[in-house]
């Protein structure tokens, strides 16, 4: 190897740095970071949203008339009994005969819906003809889907109002029977996923025949009929 070749190999490789010169060529300008929205994609997205919304609305409508159809709760009088009875005779009072009667009724509420039923306090009123004998209340609550709950309603009947009626007293003493009526009402609401809410009012009319003697009072018969109230 010659001396000239050795000198050439010992020389380091060198590169010339390119000169930077301003240019006005648009083809080599930097790319803008802005996002360019394609109008076709926007239309397609809106169409998809509209379609999905329509399908969901139709599905909810179908379910509201089938699976989620709201039905009125059912009231039933399971039993009614006399818990306490006392009669007093006194010549010093305005009414010679005074009586106290405590009635306990067993009422059930059935929720036929697949959503819960939230109801206010249950009201039960007892009447003799058109005269109110007393009003009893059961607490408010919430009944689960397709569940039934039973409520005990206790009422102290204002029997003195019956005694004031001469005909009623005569019938009770000689026929041994006294006819009363009761009305139980429940007001509540069901909510289907918070999207659909409906107020429900239901009632129950009952005719009650009391067997009366000088010593006892008992229930001879009870006949009830549901009375659905539309809000």
Image (cartoon, rainbow, N blue to C red):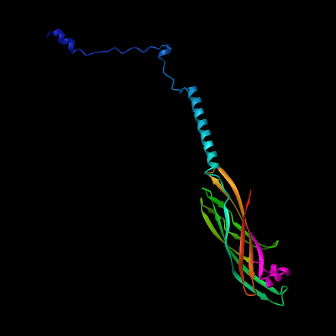
Report if residue 158 is visible in the image.
no
Q: Please give the count of numbered marks on the rendered protein.
A: 0
Residue reaching furthest left? Answer: 1
- Decide which of 23, 218 is in the foreground and name it: 218
Residue 162 higher or lower than 49, as above or below? below
Question: Residue 116: image x %, image y %?
Answer: 61, 58
- Decide which of 154, 40 is in the foreground and name it: 154
| Residue at x-position 68% and y-position 63% | 120
Q: Image quarter for residue 38?
A: top right
| Residue at x-position 21% and y-position 14% | 9
Residue reaching furthest front? Answer: 175
The quarter of the image holding the N terminus is: top left
Q: Is residue 1 left or right of residue 43?
A: left
Question: Residue 104: image x %, image y %?
Answer: 68, 76
Q: Image quarter for residue 167?
A: bottom right
Q: Image quarter for residue 83?
A: bottom right
Residue 151 higher or lower than 64, as above or below? below
Question: Residue 126: image x %, image y %?
Answer: 76, 72
Report if residue 222 is visible in the image.
yes
The quarter of the image holding the C terminus is: bottom right
Q: Where are the magenta residues, as a range?
A: 157-184
Question: Residue 108: image x %, image y %?
Answer: 65, 67
Q: In this view, does 216 lie to the left or right of 11?
A: right
- Is 171 part of what is drawn in magenta? yes
- Is 222 part of what is drawn in magenta? no
Residue 222 higher or lower than 30, as above or below? below
Residue reaching furthest bottom? Answer: 91
């Amino acid at each position: 190897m010659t001396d000239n070749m050795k000198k050439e190999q010992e020389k380091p490789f060198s590169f010339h740095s390119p000169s930077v010169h301003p240019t006005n060529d648009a083809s080599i300008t930097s790319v803008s970071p802005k996002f360019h929205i394609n109008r076709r994609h926007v239309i397609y997205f809106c169409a998809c949203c509209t379609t999905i919304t329509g399908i969901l609305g139709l599905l909810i409508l179908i379910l509201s008339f089938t699976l989620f159809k709201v039905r009125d709760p059912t009231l039933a009088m399971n039993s009614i009994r006399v818990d306490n009875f006392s009669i007093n005779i006194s010549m010093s009072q305005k009414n010679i005969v005074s009586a106290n009667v405590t009635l306990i009724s067993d009422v059930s509420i059935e929720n036929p819906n697949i959503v819960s039923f939230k109801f206010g306090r249950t009201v039960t009123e007892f009447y003799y003809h058109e005269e109110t004998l007393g009003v009893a209340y059961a607490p408010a609550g919430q009944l689960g889907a397709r569940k039934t709950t039973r409520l005990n309603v206790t009422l102290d009947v204002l029997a003195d109002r019956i005694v004031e009626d001469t005909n009623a007293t005569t019938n009770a003493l000689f026929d041994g029977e006294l006819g009363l009526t009761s009305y139980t009402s429940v007001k509540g609401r069901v909510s289907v996923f918070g999207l659909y809410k409906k107020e429900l009012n239901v009632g129950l009319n009952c005719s009650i025949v009391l067997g009366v003697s000088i010593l006892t009072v008992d229930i001879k018969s009870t006949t009830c009929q549901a009375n659905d109230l539309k809000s």
